[in-house]
Image: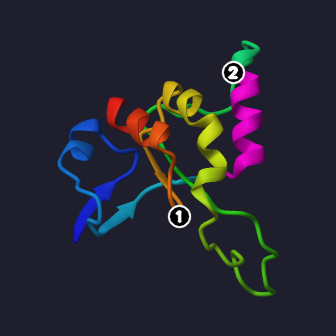
Amino acid sequence: MKRISLPIDKQVISILKRGDEVLLTGYLYTARDKAHKRIVNTSKRGGRLPFNLSGESIYYVGPTPTPPSKIIGACGPTTSIRMDPYMKDILDLGVVATIGKGERTKDVISLIKKY
């Protein structure tokens, strides 16, 4: 298992291989397609995001109700392909890693390799 501190340095990413098990430490952004759309639209309009995505990672997870006496609800991954239409813009904003489930389009796989 590889231990990685967030935000991730691009040199660290270059040594990872598909299927590697990693232990992430640090802050991880969570967002689904609606949030991606909002982030991209704000950026394209020249608006300022209230956070910097450079070097950051996004976990594709949706909100669930927090049970009583817990700090968070369930946090299972959501389908990655739903974020694919926004991926180029998200990568342009500096995101270096995403976590989700399922396949990615060939175009997004090419983009990830490029960035």
Q: Is residue 30 visible?
A: no
Query: Which image quadrant: the C terminus?
Result: top left
Percent across and percent down for residue 51 are 62, 34
Disc 1 marks which amino acid?
Gly
For the residue carrying disc 1, how many other residues have a C-alpha within 10 Å: few (<14), some (14-19), or many (20+)?
few
Numbered tag placed on residue 43 in the rendering: 2
First in residue order: circle 1 vs circle 2: 2
Query: Mark 2 belongs to which amino acid?
Result: Ser
Q: Looking at the image, which residue is at 74% across and 44% down?
A: 35
- 40 is within the stretch colored magenta: yes
Indicate the quadrant containing the N terminus: top left, top right, bottom left or bottom right.
bottom left
- Find residue 15 and report its horizontal and vertical position in percent: 17, 49
* Residue in the image at 54% along x and 29% along y: 88
Measuring 28% from the left and 37% from the top, which residue is drawn there? 10
Q: Is residue 75 above or below residue 47?
A: below
Which span is picked out in magenta? 31-43
Q: Which mark is residue 102?
A: 1
Q: Residues within 10 Å of mark 2 (few under 14, many from 20)?
A: some
Secondary structure under tag 2 reads: helix
Q: Nearer the viewer, residue 60 or 81?
A: 81
Q: Is residue 3 magenta?
A: no
Which one is in front in this view, the residue at disc 1 or the one at disc 2? 1
Residue 11 relative to residue 43: left or right: left
Q: Percent x, y for residue 54?
A: 47, 31
**Dominant secondary structure (helix, strand or loop) of the stretch shown in magenta:** helix
Residue 19 vs residue 15: left or right?
right
Quarter occupied by residue 13: top left
